[in-house]
Protein backbone atom coordinates (compact mmCIF):
# COMPACT_ATOMS: atom_id res chain seq x y z
CA UNK A 1 0.00 0.00 0.00
CA UNK A 2 1.36 3.42 -0.99
CA UNK A 3 1.86 5.82 1.91
CA UNK A 4 3.68 9.03 2.90
CA UNK A 5 6.81 7.22 4.10
CA UNK A 6 7.15 5.35 0.80
CA UNK A 7 6.66 8.61 -1.08
CA UNK A 8 9.48 10.24 0.90
CA UNK A 9 11.67 7.17 0.31
CA UNK A 10 11.02 7.47 -3.44
CA UNK A 11 11.98 11.16 -3.30
CA UNK A 12 15.17 10.26 -1.41
CA UNK A 13 16.08 7.59 -3.96
CA UNK A 14 15.43 10.04 -6.83
CA UNK A 15 17.62 12.64 -5.10
CA UNK A 16 20.46 10.11 -4.68
CA UNK A 17 20.12 9.14 -8.36
CA UNK A 18 20.27 12.84 -9.31
CA UNK A 19 23.38 13.30 -7.13
CA UNK A 20 25.02 10.32 -8.85
CA UNK A 21 24.04 11.69 -12.26
CA UNK A 22 25.46 15.16 -11.53
CA UNK A 23 28.67 13.65 -10.10
CA UNK A 24 29.05 11.38 -13.14
CA UNK A 25 28.41 14.36 -15.44
CA UNK A 26 31.06 16.41 -13.59
CA UNK A 27 33.63 13.58 -13.76
CA UNK A 28 33.03 12.91 -17.45
CA UNK A 29 32.77 16.58 -18.42
CA UNK A 30 36.29 16.83 -19.93
CA UNK A 31 35.39 13.98 -22.27
CA UNK A 32 31.81 15.06 -22.86
CA UNK A 33 31.87 17.65 -25.67
CA UNK A 34 31.20 14.95 -28.25
CA UNK A 35 27.94 14.10 -26.49
CA UNK A 36 26.47 17.58 -26.82
CA UNK A 37 23.67 17.73 -29.36
CA UNK A 38 25.05 20.88 -30.91
CA UNK A 39 26.90 21.51 -34.10
CA UNK A 40 30.28 19.78 -33.79
CA UNK A 41 32.13 22.75 -35.18
CA UNK A 42 31.17 24.79 -32.10
CA UNK A 43 31.98 22.28 -29.37
CA UNK A 44 35.10 20.90 -30.99
CA UNK A 45 36.65 24.34 -30.72
CA UNK A 46 39.06 23.73 -27.78
CA UNK A 47 39.09 27.41 -26.81
CA UNK A 48 35.30 27.55 -26.67
CA UNK A 49 35.08 24.33 -24.65
CA UNK A 50 37.70 25.64 -22.23
CA UNK A 51 35.64 28.80 -21.73
CA UNK A 52 32.49 26.75 -21.15
CA UNK A 53 34.00 24.31 -18.63
CA UNK A 54 34.28 26.61 -15.57
CA UNK A 55 30.64 27.56 -15.97
CA UNK A 56 29.53 23.95 -16.28
CA UNK A 57 31.58 22.96 -13.22
CA UNK A 58 30.03 25.90 -11.35
CA UNK A 59 26.59 24.59 -12.33
CA UNK A 60 27.57 21.09 -11.13
CA UNK A 61 28.71 22.49 -7.77
CA UNK A 62 25.50 24.49 -7.33
CA UNK A 63 23.38 21.50 -8.39
CA UNK A 64 25.17 19.20 -5.94
CA UNK A 65 24.74 21.75 -3.14
CA UNK A 66 21.01 22.01 -3.95
CA UNK A 67 20.64 18.22 -4.02
CA UNK A 68 22.41 17.77 -0.68
CA UNK A 69 20.11 20.43 0.80
CA UNK A 70 17.18 18.53 -0.69
CA UNK A 71 18.39 15.37 1.06
CA UNK A 72 18.55 17.24 4.37
CA UNK A 73 15.08 18.67 3.74
CA UNK A 74 13.64 15.22 3.01
CA UNK A 75 15.36 13.84 6.12
CA UNK A 76 13.74 16.55 8.23
CA UNK A 77 10.33 15.90 6.65
CA UNK A 78 10.73 12.17 7.37
CA UNK A 79 11.50 13.07 11.01
CA UNK A 80 8.23 15.03 11.15
CA UNK A 81 9.91 18.46 11.18
CA UNK A 82 8.23 20.26 8.30
CA UNK A 83 7.43 23.87 9.16
CA UNK A 84 10.73 24.87 10.77
CA UNK A 85 13.22 27.70 10.37
CA UNK A 86 15.88 25.18 9.27
CA UNK A 87 13.69 24.01 6.37
CA UNK A 88 12.98 27.61 5.35
CA UNK A 89 16.74 28.26 5.31
CA UNK A 90 17.30 25.10 3.22
CA UNK A 91 14.65 26.15 0.70
CA UNK A 92 16.16 29.63 0.50
CA UNK A 93 19.60 28.10 -0.11
CA UNK A 94 18.19 25.79 -2.83
CA UNK A 95 16.60 28.83 -4.44
CA UNK A 96 19.98 30.63 -4.43
CA UNK A 97 21.67 27.55 -5.92
CA UNK A 98 19.11 27.65 -8.75
CA UNK A 99 19.78 31.35 -9.20
CA UNK A 100 23.52 30.64 -9.42
CA UNK A 101 22.87 28.06 -12.16
CA UNK A 102 20.62 30.57 -13.95
CA UNK A 103 23.27 33.30 -13.73
CA UNK A 104 26.11 31.02 -14.88
CA UNK A 105 24.11 29.67 -17.79
CA UNK A 106 22.82 33.06 -18.92
CA UNK A 107 26.37 34.46 -18.88
CA UNK A 108 27.59 31.36 -20.76
CA UNK A 109 24.73 31.77 -23.23
CA UNK A 110 25.65 35.38 -23.87
CA UNK A 111 29.45 35.06 -23.89
CA UNK A 112 30.23 31.51 -24.99
CA UNK A 113 27.41 29.74 -26.81
CA UNK A 114 24.68 32.17 -27.82
CA UNK A 115 22.13 29.49 -28.72
CA UNK A 116 18.40 29.43 -27.91
CA UNK A 117 18.87 26.05 -26.15
CA UNK A 118 21.29 27.56 -23.60
CA UNK A 119 18.91 30.46 -22.96
CA UNK A 120 15.98 28.06 -22.49
CA UNK A 121 18.00 25.94 -20.00
CA UNK A 122 19.06 29.11 -18.14
CA UNK A 123 15.47 30.36 -17.99
CA UNK A 124 14.35 26.96 -16.70
CA UNK A 125 16.82 27.29 -13.83
CA UNK A 126 15.55 30.84 -13.24
CA UNK A 127 11.96 29.62 -13.18
CA UNK A 128 12.93 26.87 -10.72
CA UNK A 129 14.59 29.52 -8.54
CA UNK A 130 11.35 31.52 -8.53
CA UNK A 131 9.30 28.42 -7.67
CA UNK A 132 11.60 27.57 -4.76
CA UNK A 133 11.33 31.14 -3.45
CA UNK A 134 7.55 30.95 -3.49
CA UNK A 135 7.60 27.53 -1.77
CA UNK A 136 9.99 29.00 0.79
CA UNK A 137 7.59 31.90 1.41
CA UNK A 138 4.67 29.48 1.81
CA UNK A 139 6.59 27.27 4.28
CA UNK A 140 7.69 30.36 6.22
CA UNK A 141 4.08 31.60 6.47
CA UNK A 142 2.96 28.12 7.54
CA UNK A 143 5.74 28.06 10.15
CA UNK A 144 4.45 31.33 11.64
CA UNK A 145 0.88 29.98 11.77
CA UNK A 146 2.10 26.72 13.35
CA UNK A 147 4.19 28.63 15.90
CA UNK A 148 1.18 30.75 16.86
CA UNK A 149 -0.99 27.66 17.05
CA UNK A 150 1.57 25.82 19.18
CA UNK A 151 1.72 28.74 21.60
CA UNK A 152 -2.02 29.19 21.87
CA UNK A 153 -3.12 27.78 25.20
CA UNK B 1 8.97 43.70 25.03
CA UNK B 2 5.84 42.09 26.40
CA UNK B 3 2.52 43.93 25.81
CA UNK B 4 0.28 41.56 27.76
CA UNK B 5 1.69 40.05 30.93
CA UNK B 6 0.18 36.96 32.57
CA UNK B 7 0.26 37.08 36.35
CA UNK B 8 -0.67 33.46 36.75
CA UNK B 9 2.11 32.63 39.19
CA UNK B 10 0.92 35.41 41.54
CA UNK B 11 -2.68 34.18 41.45
CA UNK B 12 -1.56 30.59 41.93
CA UNK B 13 0.52 31.60 44.95
CA UNK B 14 -2.44 33.56 46.39
CA UNK B 15 -4.77 30.56 45.96
CA UNK B 16 -2.04 28.09 46.93
CA UNK B 17 -2.60 25.92 43.88
CA UNK B 18 0.13 23.79 42.33
CA UNK B 19 0.85 23.83 38.62
CA UNK B 20 0.06 20.15 38.05
CA UNK B 21 -3.18 20.38 40.02
CA UNK B 22 -4.31 23.54 38.21
CA UNK B 23 -3.43 22.08 34.80
CA UNK B 24 -5.53 19.00 35.54
CA UNK B 25 -8.44 21.09 36.81
CA UNK B 26 -8.59 23.38 33.78
CA UNK B 27 -7.92 20.58 31.30
CA UNK B 28 -4.61 21.64 29.76
CA UNK B 29 -1.23 19.95 29.89
CA UNK B 30 1.38 21.04 32.47
CA UNK B 31 3.61 22.03 29.54
CA UNK B 32 0.97 24.42 28.21
CA UNK B 33 0.39 25.82 31.69
CA UNK B 34 4.13 26.41 31.95
CA UNK B 35 4.07 28.23 28.57
CA UNK B 36 1.27 30.40 29.93
CA UNK B 37 2.97 31.02 33.29
CA UNK B 38 6.28 31.97 31.69
CA UNK B 39 4.67 34.48 29.31
CA UNK B 40 5.68 32.45 26.27
CA UNK B 41 2.10 32.06 25.00
CA UNK B 42 1.10 33.96 21.85
CA UNK B 43 -2.63 33.62 22.48
CA UNK B 44 -5.07 32.32 25.06
CA UNK B 45 -8.43 30.74 24.30
CA UNK B 46 -11.51 32.18 26.04
CA UNK B 47 -12.28 28.65 27.27
CA UNK B 48 -8.85 28.45 28.98
CA UNK B 49 -9.26 31.92 30.48
CA UNK B 50 -12.74 31.02 31.68
CA UNK B 51 -11.45 27.80 33.31
CA UNK B 52 -8.58 29.70 34.94
CA UNK B 53 -10.96 32.33 36.34
CA UNK B 54 -13.30 29.62 37.58
CA UNK B 55 -10.59 27.57 39.30
CA UNK B 56 -8.67 30.53 40.72
CA UNK B 57 -11.86 32.39 41.59
CA UNK B 58 -10.75 35.62 40.00
CA UNK B 59 -11.43 38.02 37.13
CA UNK B 60 -9.50 38.03 33.81
CA UNK B 61 -7.99 41.39 34.80
CA UNK B 62 -6.32 39.77 37.78
CA UNK B 63 -4.54 37.32 35.50
CA UNK B 64 -3.84 39.54 32.50
CA UNK B 65 -2.13 42.92 32.65
CA UNK B 66 -1.15 45.33 29.91
CA UNK B 67 2.41 46.64 30.08
CA UNK B 68 3.83 49.47 28.00
CA UNK B 69 6.14 47.98 25.42
CA UNK B 70 9.77 48.90 25.99
CA UNK B 71 11.47 50.93 23.29
CA UNK B 72 14.42 49.18 21.67
CA UNK B 73 17.42 51.17 20.58
CA UNK B 74 18.29 50.98 16.91
CA UNK B 75 21.68 52.55 16.67
Image: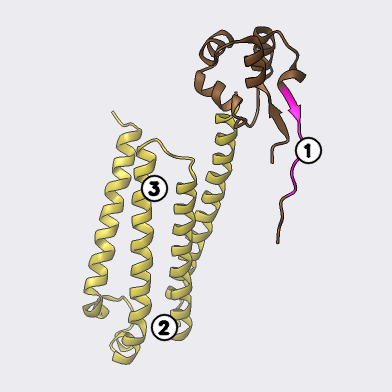
Query: Mark 1 highlights which residue?
Result: B68
Label pair 1/2, CB-CB below 8 angstroms: no
Which segment is the magenta one? B64-71
Q: Secondary structure at mark 3?
A: helix
Tell me, yes or no, whether dots 3 and 1 are on the same chain.
Answer: no
Residue A82 in percent (x, y) is at: 45, 40
Query: Mark 3 highlights which residue?
Result: A73
Query: Mark 2 highlights which residue?
Result: A113
Image height check: is A85 above or below A19?
above
Can you tell which of label 1 and label 2 is closer to the viewer?
Answer: 1
Crowd rating for badge 2 (residues with CA inside 10 Å; few <14, some 14–19, many 20+)? many
Residue B72 in percent (x, y) is at: 71, 51
Q: Quadrant of residue B16?
A: top right
Side of B59 relative to A149 (left or right): right
What residue sits 57% from the left and 8% below the top? B25
What residue sits 65% from the left and 10% below the top? B15
Does residue A86 show up magenta in the picture?
no
Q: Secondary structure at mark 2?
A: loop
Q: Quadrant of the N terminus of chain A?
A: top left
Chain shown brown: that is B
Residue B23 in percent (x, y) is at: 55, 14
Does residue A64 appear anywhere in the picture?
A: yes
Label pair 3/2, CB-CB below 8 angstroms: no
Q: Give the chain of mark 3.
A: A
Chain shown yellow: that is A
Amino acid sequence: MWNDQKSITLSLVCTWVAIAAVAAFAVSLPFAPRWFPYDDSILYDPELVARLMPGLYGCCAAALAALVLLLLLLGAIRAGEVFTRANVRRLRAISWCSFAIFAILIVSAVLVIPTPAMIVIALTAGFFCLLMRVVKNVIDAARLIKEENDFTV
Amino acid sequence: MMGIRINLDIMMAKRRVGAGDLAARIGITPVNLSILKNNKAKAIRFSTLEALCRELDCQPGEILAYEEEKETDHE
